[in-house]
Image: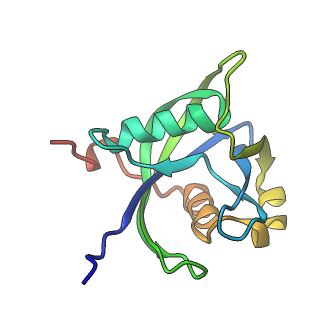
Amino acid sequence: MEQWVPHVTVACVIEQDGKYLMVEERDKFSGKMVFNQPAGHLEEGESLADAALRETLEETGWRVELTGVLSVALHTASQTGITYCRTTFLAEPLEAVEDAVLDPDIHAVHWLDYESIVARSARMRSPLALTVIERYRQGIAYPLGLIQHA
């Protein structure tokens, strides 16, 4: 019998001047172009915070500073049945890295206002992408100390 293991992922909600840093990428399961926050899988030996910083840089070319935790959520993808345990951080943009090389799956990086994100809601990689932005807009955030790395 195969052991069930959730996939541990991280994401960052990054807002600046009313716009959110989003990536447009090809979903490897459906082949469709989808939108998401910068996000990805935790690598062995990495803290959740380090993974969030790494994934944001790899997917957007932006260095950010983590400022809070928006959510920890379990989500089972309907098309694959894979369960993800996703920790979403709140972050502030620090600087765009000149000549950054992005992950090959990333088609484009966008700064989108909330209305533009809602208009693309059917093209979000998962329902969590819009949910965490709405949590941020409601002022829901927790201190970084909520996450411990032993």
State left or right for residue 111 relative to residue 130. Answer: right
State left or right for residue 148 relative to residue 59. Answer: left
Q: How is the image coloured?
A: rainbow
- Establish if 133 lies above or below 60: below
Question: Which percent across, then down, holds residue 10?
Answer: 46, 51
Image quadrant assignment for residue 7: bottom left
Q: Residue at 69% of width from left, 61% of height from top?
A: 27
The number of discs equals 0
Residue found at the far left of this picture: 150
Question: Which percent across, then down, holds residue 106?
Answer: 71, 44
Q: Residue at 65% of width from left, 19% of height from top?
A: 97
Quadrant where the N terminus is found in the figure:
bottom left
Q: 135 or 108, which lies in front? A: 108
Residue found at the far front of this picture: 1
Quadrant where the C terminus is found in the figure:
top left
Image quadrant assignment for residue 118: bottom right
Q: Residue at 52% of width from left, 39% of height from top?
A: 55
Do we see residue 78 in this rendering? Answer: yes
Question: Which percent across, then down, holds residue 59?
Answer: 63, 38
State left or right for residue 79 relative to residue 81. Answer: right
- Establish if 106 lies above or below 126: above
Do we see residue 11 in this rendering? Answer: no
Question: Which percent across, then down, holds residue 93?
Answer: 60, 29
